[in-house]
Image: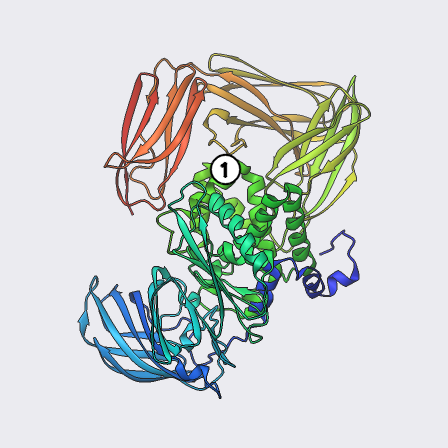
């Protein structure tokens, strides 16, 4: 593969040069460095898939005696217990949990547990009977943490903290250590009286008895095990401030700052208020009962870790964009957690993109775009050649160097969200983003990438499989080698543009592209069109002489390389294309001035009225073929008659095909045709029953104000599929019921005094 792009040799040596240059600004860089440099203990004897999981953990109740960990010689050993409450999914008489043998010694089990074995980092607990699906029970595990360094439970000089991503929780308490199973957490801890200890959720109690303090933290919201945290230190600094929702003074969020003595957190406390306000406006209300940050010691040397409601930071790391990155994780990573490590994009891509959004809010769109361009350069300069999501990672946890690779997981992930914003436009994109963050089927749960895709598809009212497949599940990026020509045709000028991709190590990338045409006089013209096949030709006619053409003038498709060169005019010179109608009959006429190797024309049609709202592109179908004249220097006339069966606006275009198979498209012509309907019609959806999507058609005999809505069997509004002024014609909408329960739904069309209803059945 050859990239036609000029690079400094310093940039291609390593991404580390880039990282060092922006380390004081980019939270994503610090976050990636921290996670890549965390030692991941390789458990060779544990199977890739881990133990059988036929239960749902509801709660972990931890009770830890950490007292001696804070006293010289600062041992890493402690005693503790955990009560695991779980609901049975399929009949079982034992459960298996993750518990690393070198870190944990199991003493005994109780409650429903009667005996155990602890082999190959798997704790198997035999239960007192067979439990059937739907039953809930508890086991209690008494254990010791051994005096070992395991890169999850850290002790040093009066400080104790945990750091667990991706799967380190199993090193300090027995658990089902996968992000797909989240549970509420209660954590009790015994420490010396001089210790301040923070954890997930709210501080329910702290009781001082003599020289000892007993902490009790409770998280009412489910937590992924890798986000369970302890941050504690002798003589820890602690400041607490409250964020008050500007639109609801009764909505108060406490924010706790744990810090090392000597650190100045004044600026951090000042910036957290507008940061909370901004993210709450863009993503929805802050999801938890508190937020917090805690700086640690030099054992935590890099960046941050987004533990739920209490982010860990490296010593004195109160940088604005590191805080913004980790704070955004409270929505994307903590409230909605990646279900598997193949879905890490939902965590890190989102948090990195959120930094750019914060920059846009503080400064300008240009500042946002500068951040995105920097991320794109980081990816292009250090692309390792794998996709953002590898399905194997859902089964086998990859190395930290792969999982937290900056170029892919952070930089490309953020850029893909920018590309989605570009494709959909701000209104649909941010509506969809907020809908994802507030989807009741995902909120406080785990999600896979397809969940996000379905929410965004619903917001855009179009199927976005094409976008996610190429940018998320395929590697690399498009390499454009585009061409153009200017040709005078009579008193006008024709501009031809060829969109050509030459990459050989990945798929063709379908994308809307922009062209800016400048002229010898007068203003520029900006054109946006859909490039949906390779080597696609586009033609434009102007009454001014063009001077230059620029591809993607604002660099919206940031993940690309591109060149543009002049090419000869296409061999078939189309001089006219028109369409006229008489009822259901459409007459197409076109003419050519010259032809070279012209095999003929495929005629394509699209009923524009049936396009999904927000899609912005035609849905073409082939309706005929007209033979060409090979090579000719004489003008030629062509025509075709089409019969349509529905009233609406139809678009037509020609696909001119040469004998060697190369082709180009004409510009579109639009004509109104068909028998105008004489009544309002709301058709039965199809398919029916359905899961999860179905199509709904309606017909208007006249221009009308339309409201097409879906309700559940209780009469509650589920979705609005169409709203506003519509011309007469036939329309089609897609209803996506992902996240909805099975049952009967009613869709209602209201147009003035006309109300039409139909039932449909969702089966899952």
Where does residue 736 sit, x and y in percent of width and height? 38, 40
Question: Going 43% across and 65% down the picture, which residue do you hit?
Answer: 227
Residue 231 seen in render? yes
User: Does 763 appear above or below 724?
Assistant: below
Q: In the figure, is residue 312 to the left or right of 599?
A: left
Where does residue 445 sit, x and y in percent of width and height? 37, 56
- The residue most toward the bottom is 73
Q: How many marks?
A: 1
User: Does 419 appear above or below 167?
Assistant: above
Judging depth in this view, the residue of 736 and 676 nearest the camera is 736
Q: In the figure, is residue 473 to the left or right of 376?
A: left
Judging depth in this view, the residue of 108 and 42 nearest the camera is 108
Q: Which residue is mark 1?
A: 428
Where does residue 351 sit, x and y in percent of width and height? 53, 55
Q: Quadrant of residue 364?
A: top right
Judging depth in this view, the residue of 596 and 578 nearest the camera is 578
Crowd band around label 1 with a 10 angstrom C-alpha radius: few (<14), some (14–19), many (20+) = some
Question: Going 79% across and 58% down the picture, which residue do you hit?
Answer: 8
Q: In the figure, is residue 418 to the left or right of 436?
A: right
Q: In the figure, is residue 295 to the left or right of 678?
A: right
- The residue most toward the left is 129
Quadrant for the N terminus, please: bottom right
């Amino acid at each position: 593969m050859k990239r036609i792009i000029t690079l400094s040799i310093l940039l291609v040596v390593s991404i580390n040069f880039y990282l060092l240059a922006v380390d004081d600004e980019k939270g994503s860089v610090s976050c990636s460095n921290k996670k890549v440099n965390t030692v991941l203990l390789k458990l060779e004897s544990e199977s890739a898939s881990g133990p059988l999981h036929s239960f749902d953990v509801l709660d972990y109740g931890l009770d830890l005696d950490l007292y001696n960990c804070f006293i010289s010689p600062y041992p890493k050993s402690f005693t503790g217990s955990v009560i695991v409450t779980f609901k049975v999914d399929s009949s079982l008489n034992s459960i298996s949990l993750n518990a690393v043998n070198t870190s944990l010694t199991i003493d005994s089990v109780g409650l429903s547990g009667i005996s155990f074995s602890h082999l190959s980092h798997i704790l198997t607990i035999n239960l007192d009977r067979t439990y059937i699906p739907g039953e809930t029970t508890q086991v209690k595990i008494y254990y010791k943490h051994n005096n070992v360094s395991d890169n999850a439970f850290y002790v040093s000089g009066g400080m104790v903290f945990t750091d667990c991503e991706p799967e380190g929780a199993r090193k300090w308490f027995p658990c089902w250590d996968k992000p797909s199973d989240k549970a509420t957490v209660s954590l009790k801890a015994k420490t010396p009286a001089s210790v301040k200890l923070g954890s997930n959720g709210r501080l329910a109690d702290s009781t001082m008895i003599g020289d000892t303090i007993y902490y009790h933290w409770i998280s009412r919201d489910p937590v992924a095990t890798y986000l369970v945290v302890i941050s504690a230190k002798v003589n820890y600094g602690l400041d607490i401030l409250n964020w008050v929702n500007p639109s609801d003074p009764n909505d108060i969020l406490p924010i706790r700052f744990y810090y090392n003595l000597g650190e100045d957190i004044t600026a951090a406390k000042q910036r957290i208020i507008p940061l909370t306000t901004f993210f709450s406006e863009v993503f929805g209300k802050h999801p938890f009962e508190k937020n917090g940050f805690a700086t640690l010691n030099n054992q935590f040397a890099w960046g941050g870790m987004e533990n739920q409601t209490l982010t860990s930071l490296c010593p004195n790391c109160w940088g604005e964009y590191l805080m913004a990155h980790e704070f955004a994780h409270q929505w994307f990573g903590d409230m909605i957690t990646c279900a598997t490590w193949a879905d890490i994009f939902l965590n890190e891509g989102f948090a990195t993109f959120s930094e750019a959004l914060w920059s846009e809010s503080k400064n300008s769109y240009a500042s946002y775009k500068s951040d995105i361009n920097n991320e794109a350069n980081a990816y292009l300069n250090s692309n390792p050649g794998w996709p953002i999501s590898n399905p194997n990672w859902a089964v086998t946890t990859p190395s930290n160097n792969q999982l937290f690779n900056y170029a892919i997981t952070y930089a490309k992930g953020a850029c893909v969200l920018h590309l989605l914003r570009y494709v959909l436009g701000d209104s649909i994109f941010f509506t969809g983003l907020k809908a994802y963050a507030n989807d009741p089927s995902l909120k406080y749960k785990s999600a896979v990438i397809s969940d996000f895709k379905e929410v965004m598809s619903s917001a855009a009212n179009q199927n976005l499989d094409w976008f996610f497949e190429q940018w998320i599940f395929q590697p690399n990026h498009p390499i454009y080698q585009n061409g153009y020509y200017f040709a005078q045709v009579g008193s006008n000028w024709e501009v031809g543009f060829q969109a050509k991709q030459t990459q050989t190590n990945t798929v063709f990338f379908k994308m809307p592209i922009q062209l800016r045409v400048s002229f010898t006089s007068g203003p520029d013209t900006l054109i946006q069109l859909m490039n949906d096949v390779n080597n696609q030709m586009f033609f434009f006619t102007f009454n001014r002489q063009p001077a230059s053409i620029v591809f993607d003038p604002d660099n919206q498709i940031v993940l690309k390389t591109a060149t543009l060169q002049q090419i000869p005019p296409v061999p078939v010179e189309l001089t006219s294309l028109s369409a006229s109608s008489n009822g259901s009959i459409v007459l197409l006429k076109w003419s050519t001035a010259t032809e070279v190797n012209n095999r003929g024309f495929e005629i394509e049609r699209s009923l524009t009225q049936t396009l999904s709202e927000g899609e912005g592109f035609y849905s073409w179908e082939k309706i005929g073929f007209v033979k060409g004249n090979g090579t000719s220097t004489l003008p030629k006339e062509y025509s075709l008659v089409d019969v349509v069966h529905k009233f609406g606006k139809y678009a037509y275009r020609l696909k001119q095909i040469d004998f060697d198979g190369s082709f180009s498209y004409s510009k579109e012509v639009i004509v109104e045709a068909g028998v105008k309907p004489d009544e309002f019609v709301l058709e039965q959806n199809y398919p029916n029953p359905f899961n999860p999507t179905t199509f709904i058609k309606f017909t208007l005999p006249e221009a009308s104000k339309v409201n097409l809505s879906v309700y559940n069997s209780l009469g509650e509004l589920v979705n609005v599929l169409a709203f506003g002024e519509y011309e007469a014609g036939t329309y089609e909408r897609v209803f996506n019921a992902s996240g909805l329960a099975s049952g009967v739904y009613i869709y209602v069309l209201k147009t003035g005094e006309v109300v039409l209803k139909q039932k449909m059945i969702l089966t899952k």
